[in-house]
């Protein structure tokens, strides 16, 4: 039983990271209706930004850690806005397939660009937050796991506040309901889309740093698998739905750690895709999503 | 004789002739040529799905893996039992043909089974689910000790020749172009251009999609078999997401649905790294920039040219 609870805690911290990423996918899908394949690589850039920021911050302190986190989030927000401005905006009215291909291209461009600039060898991520092991009866929680869970909760709360309590958040919701009607009532689509990318990318950047802390090595291709899995989580919860993305991420993180701790651990990476296939076939709209009908 | 049949016959004869008298040719050039052939086979087969039928699949490497593993298993495990100690060259190649067919057919079966449920989805979702299936195929091979697990298989006999490679290329190009130009095959294009309109005029879009997917998977499986008996060692990592992307880049660069353009693109993308060895590290960056740039500037592909009025 304590073994199970321990895995559940591990799953919670993994799921929290997936949630940060999945929210970015789901928000972009909400306003633009396409999958931002490059999102996973923004996550990777976030951990690289954190790696370099950590050199200028006091190691192992709370404020230093938060500063590194903030630096990575800012860098990613800028990157996200740039990606949107120069790659996706010119394609906004292009066929969906073209956007998808451009997104895959961008993803590869970021991966191999970073590889070219910083090399392919994995680097060790420094311990930016204070390190400790907390013992709760038979359960062990590392301080990094605790940081992941607390920071993710904080960011999710912040996101909830932005989306539901601010004017820009209301504009985002309006655009995701109906882009044309939103423009008719005076919402600037470009501002909203850019803001969405900044927000999603900042979350991905935070996710990148948190992920790198727990799996302490970073390389240009580290984003691929977490990115795909977070995307699966977003679909699982219902793409376009913020609570859905968080829920899907927690389910996926839990399922993956439980399988990873069992005798079938080598099949861990297949779990996400198995779940994807099942959900696509049984309930394509996801757990909390609404099915849309295509009108001719 | 129709043009396509003549072209098929000519390329088959040429391929066999090159192999028969190829002893004098530089082995390096032959090797590169076979790589080009395999790339063409993969690209042409994916083009049937992505280009002609308009269903964006990101999992072609999965079918290639199925073909590579199954045909290697045939030549490694089955051949010694069937042929005994020192088989003749003819017997070996006959068995190789059988092995390629087995690889292709099992890949086609996988394509059918995967396509049937997943082709109900469109666009982004289809790309993702095919990617998911390809990853699952890879993980399954990685966890099958009988097929080498994570180490993979090695020690396959070097049976891939110019004749086999380009014979299959010719067969694939012939099949695809005849199919697309037939009355039945116009349905593929109809499904691509407007699925709802196609369904409204009495075509069954799902059926067309599954046929395209299955046929594409067959040739990808054969290409995998050829690949395995050219490289003589395969492992699951060789058939990952990036391999699929590479094939997709060929199809997009060539202009989706344009067989000649896709052949040119596959040739170019296989030759470029050979010519540009010094800048090999930039290769993927260039691919990626090409993809984005093409979509922004020339979404119809680089080689979307027509020869006169004919559609190859």
Image: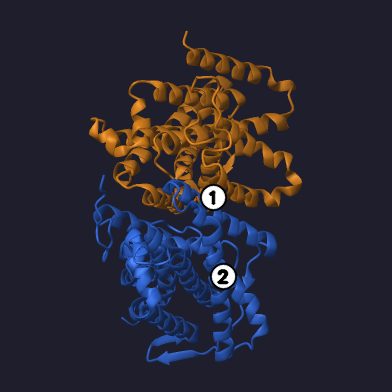
- Residue on which disc 2 sits: A78
Output the chain of dot 1.
Answer: B
- Residue on which disc 1 sits: B242
Asked which quadrant contains residue B214, the reply is top left
In the rendered image of the structure, the colour used to display chain A is blue
Q: Check disc 1 and report its element: helix, strand or loop.
A: helix
Relative to B217, B41 lies left or right? right
Q: How crowded is mark 2: few (under 14 residues within 10 Å), some or many (20 or more)?
A: some
| Marks 1 and 2 belong to one chain | no
In the rendered image of the structure, the colour used to display chain B is orange
Q: B7 or A173, which lies in front?
A: A173
Circle number at residue A249: none
Against A205, residue B205 (above or below) is above
Against A130, residue A161 (above or below) is above
Name the residue at 38% across, 57% down.
A33
Q: Distance between the residues labelled 1 and 2?
A: 27 Å
């Amino acid at each position: 039983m304590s073994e199970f609870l321990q895995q559940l805690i591990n799953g919670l911290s993994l799921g929290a990271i997936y949630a940060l990423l999945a929210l970015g996918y789901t928000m972009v899908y909400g306003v633009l209706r396409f999958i931002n394949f490059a999102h996973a690589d923004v996550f990777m850039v976030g951990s690289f930004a954190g790696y370099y920021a950590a050199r200028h911050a006091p190691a192992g302190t709370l404020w230093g850690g938060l500063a590194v986190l903030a630096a990575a989030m800012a860098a990613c927000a800028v990157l996200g806005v740039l990606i949107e401005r120069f790659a996706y905006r010119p394609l906004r009215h292009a066929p969906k397939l073209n956007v998808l291909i451009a997104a895959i291209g961008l993803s590869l461009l970021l991966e191999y660009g970073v590889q070219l600039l910083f090399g392919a060898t994995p680097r060790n991520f420094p311990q930016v937050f204070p390190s400790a092991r907390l013992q709760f009866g038979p359960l062990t929680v590392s301080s990094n796991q605790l940081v992941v869970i607390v920071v993710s909760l904080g960011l999710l709360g912040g996101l909830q506040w932005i989306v539901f309590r601010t004017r820009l958040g209301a504009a985002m919701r309006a655009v995701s309901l109906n882009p044309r009607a939103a423009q008719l009532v005076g919402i600037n689509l470009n501002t909203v889309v850019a803001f969405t990318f900044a927000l999603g990318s900042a979350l991905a950047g935070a996710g990148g740093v948190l992920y790198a802390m727990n799996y302490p090595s970073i390389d240009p291709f580290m984003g691929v698998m977490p990115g795909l899995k977070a995307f699966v989580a977003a679909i699982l919860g219902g793409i376009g739905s913020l609570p859905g993305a968080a829920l899907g991420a927690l389910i996926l993180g839990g399922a993956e750690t439980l399988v990873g701790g069992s005798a079938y651990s080598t099949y861990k990476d297949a779990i996400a895709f198995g779940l994807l296939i099942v959900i696509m076939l049984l309930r394509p709209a996801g757990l909390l999503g609404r099915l849309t009908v295509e009108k001719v | 004789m129709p043009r396509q049949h003549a072209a098929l016959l000519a390329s088959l004869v040429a391929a066999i002739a090159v192999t028969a008298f190829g002893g004098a040719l530089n082995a390096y050039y032959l090797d590169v040529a076979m790589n080009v052939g395999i790339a063409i086979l993969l690209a042409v087969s994916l083009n049937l799905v992505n280009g002609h039928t308009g269903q964006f699949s990101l999992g072609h490497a999965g079918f290639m893996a199925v073909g590579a593993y199954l045909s290697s298993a045939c030549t490694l495990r089955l051949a010694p039992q069937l042929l005994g100690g020192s088989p003749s060259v003819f017997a070996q190649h006959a068995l190789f043909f059988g092995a390629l067919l087995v690889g292709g057919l099992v890949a086609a079966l996988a394509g059918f089974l995967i396509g049937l449920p997943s082709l109900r989805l469109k666009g982004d979702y289809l790309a993702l689910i095919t990617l998911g299936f390809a990853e699952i195929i890879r993980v399954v091979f990685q966890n099958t000790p009988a097929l080498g697990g994570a180490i993979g298989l090695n020690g396959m006999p070097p049976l891939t020749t110019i004749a086999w490679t380009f014979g299959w290329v010719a067969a694939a190009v012939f099949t695809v172009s005849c199919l697309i130009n037939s009355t039945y095959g116009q349905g593929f294009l109809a499904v691509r251009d407007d699925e709802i309109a196609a369904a409204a005029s009495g075509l069954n879009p799902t059926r067309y999609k599954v046929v395209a997917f299955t046929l594409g998977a067959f040739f990808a499986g054969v290409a995998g078999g050829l690949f395995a008996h050219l490289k003589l060692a395969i492992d699951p990592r060789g058939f990952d997401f990036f391999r699929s992307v590479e094939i997709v880049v060929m199809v997009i660069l060539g202009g989706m649905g344009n067989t000649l353009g896709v052949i040119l693109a596959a040739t170019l993308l296989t030759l470029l790294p050979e010519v540009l060895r010094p800048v090999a590290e930039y290769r993927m960056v260039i691919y990626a920039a090409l993809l984005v740039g093409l979509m922004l500037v020339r979404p119809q592909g680089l080689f979307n040219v027509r020869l006169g009025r004919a559609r190859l």
